[in-house]
Image (tube, grey):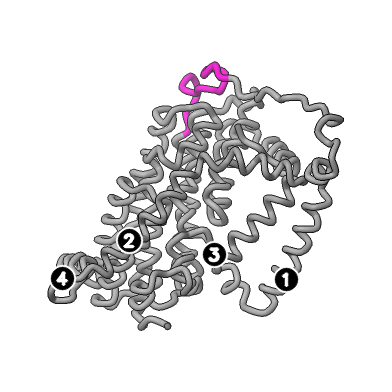
Amino acid sequence: VVSVSKPVEMLIQKMAQIPNSGRNAIVLVATVSLLISLINWAMSTVLTALLVIALAKRKELNMDYRAAAAAAIIGMGATWALGISSSAAQLQANKASLPEPIYNLTGVIPFTETIFLPQSMIMTAVLIVASIAICYWSAPKGNNIKTMDQFDIELDEEKTVVDQTKTKKRPGEWLENSPILSILIVVLGLLWMFNEFGKSNPIIAISSLNTYNFIFLMLGIALHGTPRNFLNAVSKAVPAVSGVLIQFPLYGSIAFIMTNAMNSADLSLSHYIAEFFVSIASKETFAIVMGIYSAILGFFIPSGGGKWIIEAPYVMQAAHDLKVHLGWSVQIYNAAEALPNLINPFFMLPMLGILKLKAKDVIGFTVTQLVFHIPLVLFLLWILGRTLTYTPPVF
């Protein structure tokens, strides 16, 4: 069950009228997924799934339902970690968000040194073009197409009719079903945001986790219209993200152990891991070695970037020792860590739940993406990294 605001629903319906063929519809889904993921990965998986449904209802398109569903998750495996919702980039850009041992090692690394690096934006553009091309050419043709009707699933929700005369008897009930309170909150929020963005560089302002989350909170309240609609949507959403909420305190504890637990020589566990990577890598091969490592670990720990707090101590120590650009080291982690999302069902679950499909229905298409993405990402990390030079941390 997914709750969306009326403006969003109308936008999805309008977008669904754009394509004139099944293949073009799949390209549209992939494009939307890749672009929205640069802003927020969670929003991307849900909105693209709803777009797939709207497109699937256009029978004349003869769109392969599986390929379209796979296209809806592409952003999670290609671009999300290179956008402003990157957990690693967000953490590194804010002193208050970093555990002290990591801050002492890396200092503050602003967005201008990570996701807004020209090299990072070039890599993002290449991945977008490549992902869309793969979606187009891997889409089934002719008799191999399997539409939504062939899955024999029913996507329409049962709508409960509520007697409004019974729900608005008290002043409080009337207020929570009225847009007045939502408008007041959003206006106050806008005034604060104008002040926040006016007194500092917009890039610095948006890099703050508090500001970033506040913007989406205000957007959610505005789009849902009334406080009651917003509260109902949050109530439905929390069970889906409870696992993620539980993970982050555990990662913080692990990071403390890795950076603060010392042996008799006052050396931490992260020191030995960093020492290992320095021993098997050089400045030239750092991007490839760390990229492969982050991709493999990302498959076993699907954290959506949150495990950076675990990896940062030894990844950044190795970057220091080998004199690798610190911001690019964050991007190496970002680009490689996202790759396993193409085949790991963890982040597919919201999309699969909405579309009522199973991972096996889309995995063939996403594996195809992964096969092309692995060498492409590693090559881009290596070749673009060669154009950057090491600079000491900024405290």
Eye-nearest disc, 1 or 4: 4
In space, the residues marked 1 and 3 are separated at their CA atoms by 17 Å
Magenta includes 250? no
| Tag 3 secondary structure | helix
Q: Name which residue lies at 49% across and 51% down.
A: 129
Q: Position of residue 242 (x, y in %)?
A: 48, 44
Q: As drawn, is 52 to the left or to the right of 312?
A: right
Q: Position of residue 25 (x, y in %)?
A: 59, 36
- Around disc 2, counting alpha carbons within 10 Å, would you say few (fewer than 14), some (14 to 19), or many (20 or more)? many
Q: Mark 1 sits on what residue?
A: 194
Which mark is first along the chain, 2 or 1? 1
Q: Read off the magenta span.
A: 139-153
Which mark is first along the chain, 2 or 4? 4
User: Which of 260/363 is in front?
Assistant: 260
Tell me where residue 15 sits by quadrant: top right
Decide: marks 3, 4 in contact (CB < 8 A)?
A: no
Task: Give residue 310's mark.
Answer: 2
Q: As drawn, is 218 to the left or to the right of 239?
A: right
Which mark is first along the chain, 3 or 2? 3
Instruction: Name which residue type carries label 3.
Output: Leu
Above or below for 225 versus 121: above
Which mark is first along the chain, 4 or 3? 3
- Around disc 1, counting alpha carbons within 10 Å, would you say few (fewer than 14), some (14 to 19), or many (20 or more)? few
Task: Give residue 209's mark.
Answer: 3
Q: Name which residue lies at 37% across and 40% down.
A: 343
Q: Mark 4 sits on what residue?
A: 263
In space, the residues marked 1 and 2 are separated at their CA atoms by 35 Å
- Around disc 3, counting alpha carbons within 10 Å, would you say few (fewer than 14), some (14 to 19), or many (20 or more)? some
Instruction: Name which residue type carries label 1.
Output: Phe
Q: Name which residue lies at 81% across and 48% down.
A: 179
Which mark is first along the chain, 4 or 1? 1
